[in-house]
Image: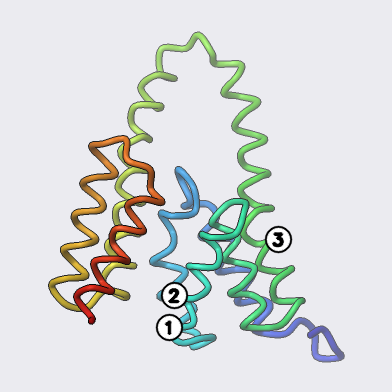
Amino acid sequence: MVGAQGVSPVLLQLFLLFAGLSMLAFGGGAGIMPDIQRDAVTYYHWMTAAEFLDMFAISRAAPGPGSLIVLLVGQKAAGLPGAAVSFLGMFLPSCLVVHCVARGWHRAAQSAWRPVVERALAPVAIGLTFASALALMRATETGFTAYAITLGGTVAFAFTRINPIILLCAGATVMLLVAA
């Protein structure tokens, strides 16, 4: 991937994509999932929408943070060097910023502006997560039944203490019964 011509354009694209997105991942990687999907599938054509959804499912089922999907995207786009560059792009810039901000944040523990900033960032994280859910729902679900199951599961998850595994199993059962 690195030769006499320099760094591969795909490796540079991966690093710049994930370095930029890492700075927007408030509240976790879910908020940037629509951007990853759009860029990987539509803009760069590194994979199909179905392949992205498979990778998304794998990243959610695997232990660890869901934002590790960047490794799968990078690997699909440029092999193991792509996975490594994607990982560095996703985590290095934001880790450096968090380190610097945390030092100042702890020094400002008694400041009047700190609670205001905390309250202001909460809706941003929630909005980005909601946008991610909508983008993934549009890309995966087709038909009234799938939308109804997604909406019902979301409402049940938000307002009850039902185990998410039970909700997933119930949704899958309904889809199997409807398809039969």
Q: Quadrant of residue 163?
A: top left
Query: Which residue shows up at 25% across the image and 71% down it?
Result: 175
Q: What amino acid is at disc 1?
A: Ala
Read off the residue under disc 3. Answer: 88
Determine crowd level at label 3: few under 14, some 14-19, many 20+ residues with C-alpha closer than 10 A. some
Please identify the quadrant where the C terminus is shown.
bottom left
SS of the residue under disc 3? helix
- The first of marks 3 and 2 along the sequence is 2
Q: Nearer the viewer, residue 83 or 100?
A: 83
Tags 1 and 2 in contact by the CB under 8 Å rule?
yes
Q: Give the numbered dot on residue 53.
A: 2
Tags 3 and 2 in contact by the CB under 8 Å rule?
no
Residue at the far right: name it: 4
Which mark's residue is nearer the viewer, 3 or 1?
1
Q: What amino acid is at disc 2?
A: Leu
Q: Quadrant of residue 121?
A: top left
